[in-house]
Amino acid sequence: MSYNILAVNPGHNGSCALVIDGEVVFYAEEERFSRMKYDGNPFKAMISVLLNHRIDEVVIGGTQPGICSLPWTQEDPYSALVRKFNPQVRVTQLGHLHHLGHATAAFYGSGFETAAAIVVDGSGSIHQERIGENGPMVQGYETESIYHCSYPHEFSAVYKRYSDGDLTNQSMYYDNGIQEFDPSVTITKSYEAVSDYLGFGWIEAGKTMGLSPYGKEDENIPEFFINGKGNKNLLKPFYPAGSFIDEDRYPYLKRFNDPKEWHRDFSLCREVDKNLAYKVQKETEEQMMNLIQKAIDITGETNIVLSGGYALNCVANYKYIKNFPNINFYIDPIAHDGGTSIGLARFAWHNQSQDSTPKKLESVYLSLPPDYSQLDVVLGNIPDLTATDTTTEDIATLIEEGNVVALFQGRAEGGPRALGNRSILFDPRHPDGKDIVNKVKNREWFRPFAGSVMEEHAAEWFEMESLQSSPFMMYVVEVKKDKVEQIPAVTHVDNTCRIQTVNPDQNQHYYDLIEAFYKKTGVPVLFNTSFNLAGEPLVETLFDAIFTLMNSEIKYLYLPEINKLVSKQ
């Protein structure tokens, strides 16, 4: 009989993952089911699993060792929910090992037999210990970790950095080379501070990354890091969540208007806003390079895996490839907190089974399969919609003619990137493509878009360096100089593009569509962005897709599995 493990990540990016005999068979984030961005309690996602699978073990992750108890039974709500489907379920609490969840997700997903795992995020689990026999007690949240990893479940922490944000706590400073307690701001916290300053909020760091190429060096902005430590005069961290810039200390950085005013109007964006984004991107990249070198020096590994929120920084990820040509990198495609449910489920499996067989994560199309059975009923109740038979070539023509087409098929992607199952597509050759689709999605003017390219043509259009492929869209690469003018809609202001390579084994329908567009235009690339509107989660169900269609300027919805085109009058 199979051994089924359901792991749960409470907190923002709430998620659950199902691992059966070591294989990841389901993963989903609660926001896709509840339609509330960053929903932290994955009950609907869990129920979707529990209705169809027996669960032998439930693993509770998160960032805290204890979850609030329910009345009467005093259970945490997640194990209580699973118990109602299987009274004999085993409960494993791992909320005190948040960074381990990131490290296990990255290592087990990589397929490497051994590796150094680097975890960098805003804050993980809290840790405390006494310095010396009679010294002070120090405590802090995980911020940066290095693990040496091997099978079946060996994760040795060779470096840990903790912070609590209390800059007045002098007893917090402690560094023995393996553990470091330092209250000053860390890599991700500095990015949070700038993102907050720019009006995006702490968690929307991807927007800061998109703005950074518009900036330049600015001598009026202080250094974010001095000798590897956060500048405590400039950056004030909160733990566990948030960070901000001390504007009062630096008049040049003083804001006098709501920063959101310039999000829709390029003319209102100040140079200092763009330059701050540029500087935090540049300096955090440098700090990450130092951390990677530290991991190599400590472990001797040439396999490096990365996870935690900062690993979603696709611009920085490409720099690692260029600066460490002899290192094999793997970037966790679900590097945010949601992905820890996959890591902890696999960790529990290897502990239980002692299995030492590497099983690389080949796909993140891991949510529920779509249900098309109600399509005719839905269309019958919405007079403005019609469904017609279609072909891949028809859709390629629609895109070539300048139409925005939404694509819905298969199981939804896990993680923050749309990879051709829940995507909005457009012609990458259109000179105003970014403005057109940003308007359709109600996004900020500076936000770039991704390009999905046939894998065999990727090196002809993009500077791939040592990359053979980029199936999870985790790298921003340089566009070949002679190709920049051919794909302006997916080429950012600095002549880069976040790419997804596609082959038939990964996604047959999507590959066929890109190929059909290539045969018509000579361009093996499609403009790809997530199928959602600003501030909303990625669509999960067919109903979500039609709802988004009806509440946007998108006219066409392509359903390749049933060869249908839904059109809006």
Image (tube, helix red, strand yellow):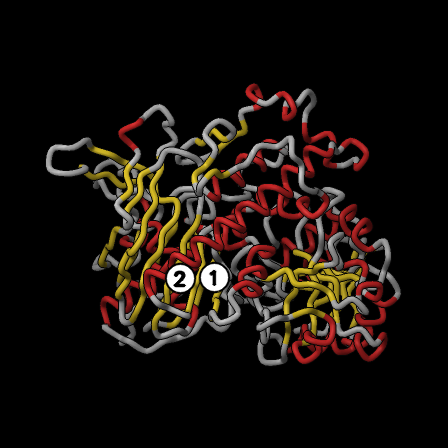
* Residue farthest to the left, as pictured: 133
The residue located at (85%, 74%) in the rendering is 521
Frontmost residue, 338 versus 55: 338
Query: Depth check: 290 or 118 in front?
Result: 290
Q: Locate residue 271, reporting x and y percent.
A: 73, 34
Left or right, residue 303 beside residue 445: left
- Amino acid type indicated by mark 2: Ala
Which residue position is annotated with label 1? 332
Classify mark 1: helix, strand or loop: loop
Task: Please tell me which residue lies in front, 141 or 408.
Answer: 141
- Report helix, strand or loop for mark 2: helix
Question: In the rendered view, does 160 fall on the left or right side of 110?
Answer: left
Mark toward the start of the polypeptide (1 vs 2) = 2
Q: Is residue 504 above or below residue 33?
A: below
In the picture of the structure, the residue carrying the numbered disc 2 is: 105
Q: Categorize mark 2 by other alpha carbons within 10 Å: few (<14), some (14-19), many (20+).
A: many
Taking the spot 59% from the left edge, 23% from the top edge, the residue there is 250
Kind of residue at badge 1 = Asp
Residue drawn at 38 percent across, 59 percent down: 295
The answer to the question of whether label 1 and label 2 lie on touching residues, with beta carbons closer than 8 A, is yes
Vertical side of 402 occupied by 165: above or below: above
Q: Position of residue 77 (x, y in %)?
A: 31, 44
Q: CA distance from mark 1 to mark 2?
A: 7 Å
